[in-house]
Amino acid sequence: MNYEPVIGLEVHIEMLTKSKMFCSCPVVDSVSAEPNSAVCPICAGHPGTLPVLNETVVDFALRVATALGCRINPVSIFARKNYFYPDLPKGYQISQYEEPLAVEGQIFIGEKLIRIRRVHLEEDTGKLTHVDGRGTAESAENPVESQNRRAPTGGYSLVDLNRAGVPLLEIVTEPDFHSAEDVRAYAELLRALVRYLGVNSGDLEKGVMRVEPNISVRPVGTETLGTKVEIKNLNSFRALERGVAYEISRQIQLIEAGGAVAQETVGWDEAKQSTYSQRSKEDAHDYRYFPEPDLPPLVVSESWMNRVRASLPELPWERYKRFRADYGLNHGEAWGLVSEKAAGEYFQSVLGAGGGAVRTVYAWVTGELFSLMNTSGYGFESGKLPPQEMAALLKLLADGKINQNTAKNVLAEMFASGASAESIVAARGLAQVSDAGFIAQIVAETLRENPHELESYRAGKVTVANFLFGQVMKKAAGKANPQVVRAELERRLKE
Amino acid sequence: MPLTLQEVEHIAKLARLELTDEEKTRYREQLSAILDHVAQLQKLDTSSVPPLAGMSGSESHLRPDLARPGLGAAELLKNAPAQADAQFKIPPVFE
Amino acid sequence: METLTEAQKLLQRGEISSRELTQQALNQISALDGKLHAFLHVDGDSALEQADAADQKRKSAPEPVSPLLGIPLAVKDVIVVEGMPCTCGSRILQGYRPPFTATAVKRLQAAGMIVLGKTNTDEFAMGSSTENSAYGVTHNPWDLTRVPGGSSGGSAAAVAAGLVPAALGTDTGGSIRQPASFCGVTGLKPTYGRVSRYGLVAYGSSLDCPGPFGRSAADVAAVFSAMQGRDPLDATSQDVPFAMNFPLAHRERAGVREKDVETATTLQGVKIGIPKEYFISGIQPEVEEKVRTAILSLKELGAEIHEVSLPHTEYALPVYYLLAPAEASANLARFDGVRYGPRVEGDSMWDVFYKTRGEKFGDEVTRRIMLGTYALSAGYYDAFYGQAQKVRTLIKRDFEQVFAKVDAIACPVAPTAAFKIGAHGDDPLAMYLEDVFTLPANLAGVPGLAFPVGFDQAGLPVGMQLMGRHFDEAALFRLAHAYQQVTDWHLAKPGIS
């Protein structure tokens, strides 16, 4: 019997607005900021406080939802999700339940359609750390998990509320995924999207984007969904792909051995590369949702929607399509430039500034320039090497004024000093020589100075030509046009 | 009585309230009496009546995205029953 | 202690200083609060400092100064004031010191009022007698064996006994109007959303209304005017202009009822509705009698009296006792021993939650949390919370239909005058029935003004309430003020003072 996996994804995205969702505390990096340094009575859940919604949070959310092709509800309602946990100051989370911000969107992974069921707003919780009897700290995030683990004796837990109240967007798909690879591809696409829209860095390791797959399996060809299992704690794209693959495999093996999949939440153990059960003894799932009385309905006007649509940049998948169509790039090349917005824009700008042929520009931008950026730590958006300057360099190369090698060196110096290609070539006298007479002369000289090698060549050892080529270039102090040298050398060797 | 003892215990668990046996019995009786009284609401046909959504009018009343400094950890922790490392200190979350 | 309006005049004329006025209040508190227990916290030193500052300001500032400058105020202990504790009448907030001040109080402080202290309340505003306070009951100044009403019993008693000219309370199901009636003072439940709830410890978020007590409609209007208005920190608050269009100044009283209509406001053209559902058997006969007499006075002043009907009145009680506890069950979930308040220790964090909440909440609060949790729980939401929200719509529509025909509704505040402390024993439902006439206004969001209209044979005050259209507090003040020009129930003082 063949089984197919059926997977739906819930992704939480932190929106990096200046202030929190319902109060004016700054949104800080809760990993690096001093604990409890960005907390006020509102996000600490003090008695008497009230939430007021940040309009830019809504704007960010509308941009994401619109980019995902969703239908925006002109009126959406907030709801209280009630449960107890030490990192949840009010004892309820303000979220959206029956009437979310947006519904019914879609996104394509290659040719496969993934339907977005809903996009809604909610606030983040604080951070809980468990310190054991020996003083070692570990994160204690999951309310369900924590009710079942045995703690080492001694120890205590600590609560930091910097993250409490940070705005979150939750994106839920229909169970339209059927492989771990597709799940990863979707996550990478979302990462590109949030970066393009300036919502956050898309960094799974930092927790600004959290992906929770719901996985079930069923016999191929059947319609009924199997029991689903939710996986948490997938903190990298690699973990995501492996975790999903592992769970699919685990479920199939279980069923084939005659067992039944239990509906539960499991955690991914990165060290063991396996999932572990977080089955709860208590039924922690009666959230008793009801409409939030402290917040009026959220009204999104037609004019706001128009402003949002007008403000969207070219989306990653739009740019991907265009790069493939207009530039003839293959999948890997196009995606590489698209997934990093600044790289794609740089590439385009160089082309636009007269950088020359697509393949040349592509090779230089993703080759030499990219490795210079990697080692130096300056990225494409740093302005370290303006695209016009890059284009000018490539033009010198294309015009034959310098050769490939020279160009590499000039690039390195441009990067370091900020000087233009033109000025460096002039100052160092690096202009390539293409003059036929000059080249004929140095080729002739080289052949006279290497009679042995000439003999070897005539005797059939053709690889000697490369040595001779190198000698000619050395004699020309690297400035000879290599194509002309090769042609002249070949001509002489064939005599 | 509308409420059983198990239901009382379940509600107390949902609300994180530790009750004595005496309280469970007493609240069971009292809450049942109240529920009997509120049951009269079931008499009304509300099939075409919308729930009263909100009391606050039609404007969303959003606020601009401006950040202001928080209270500061010291001030925030003044009311804390226990603290360590500028954080609220609590017994282990694990059982 | 003078009324607020009298105190204003004396201050303006320089016949009294704010320091003297404040000292007077503190002296009254010293003399009488031992018997009344209206206050949970008094900060005399700070109050006198502020009084001195007010006197300075009055001397040096150009005319005119705020009419509320230098006048003492008491605040119900469910409203936070930085620098003072806030217990909400509960053990679970013992020792809690709020790091901020409620907007409504801030506005009054900006207008120059001096917060003297915090007054007693039923725990988390849940109750109709102030007997549910974990810090002892407040005694009615008219009869110390009786309750002052609740949940704002401390504030009502403080004003009635002349300890302060004005005080703040909150009204979720009648908790300003009913104590006003029991204590013979004037109290306003504003329209929901009129006064910011920022800083009011939430009980029923869609029902709670902070509001003022005073000795007269004019007093109450003065405080209300400075408090009300949209607050950016409360998304449910709204801006609707409020203009006081009636003469504020009381004429001098010689203890004789004036029949001189010339100076009294005429109520020609005002239509008042008398809802038949509020005049049912079970009301203490003297209460009904006094209320009907007061309605006649309004008629004599020119108002037209009409019979009206609010057909869903009987459902107000079950609707309220599902919705308010449901909201409260969520609002009180934050009290968990983690960030503020006392903590009952345990081996695990779960122990701390269960034990702290189990031990520190009182019986009535525990009952309402449980009731509310149940009403929201899986399988019961539609029948309880959902159904209650729908019937609430019907109750609101009743009011809208009546206000298409009349400008105000007149009716009793409570079925009886103040009852004896302990009268309702451990019968929650009997206590809930005290609120039948006040609950509907909270469900509909309309304003309600309670003021005294006489005394029963036991010498206990009887109050009447006027309910108005949303945001039409002005109509209620106008009516009550006119009534108070030709009567003097509101000026009577209990023997204790």
Image: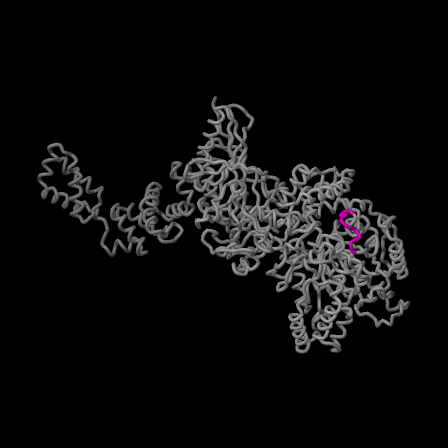
Q: Position of residue C17 (x, y in %)?
A: 72, 76
Name the side, left or right, on which C187 lies relative to A413.
right
Total number of numbered discs in the rendering: 0
- Choose between A380 and C222: the one closer to the eye: C222
Quarter of the image with the C terminus of chain A in it: top left
Q: Is residue A343 magenta?
A: no
Q: Is residue C428 magenta?
A: yes
* C273 displayed left or right of A407: right
| Residue drawn at 26 percent across, 53 percent down | A425
* Magenta-drawn segment: C421-429
Q: Is residue A93 visible?
A: yes
Residue C491: percent from the left, percent from the top?
83, 67
Q: Residue at x 54, y 61 (%)?
A: B75
What is the quadrant of residue B9 in the picture? top right
Left or right, residue C184 beside residue A371? right
Is residue C396 visible to the viewer in this orientation of the structure? no
Occupied quadrant, residue C292: bottom right
Q: Kindly report the secondary structure that dominates the magenta region of the rendered protein.
A: loop
Nearest the eye: A4 or A433: A4
Which residue is at the far top? A1
Tell me residue A180's x, y (percent).
45, 33
**A482 or B73: which is nearer to us?**
B73
Q: How did the renderer colour the structure?
A: one colour
Residue C481: x percent and y percent?
82, 64
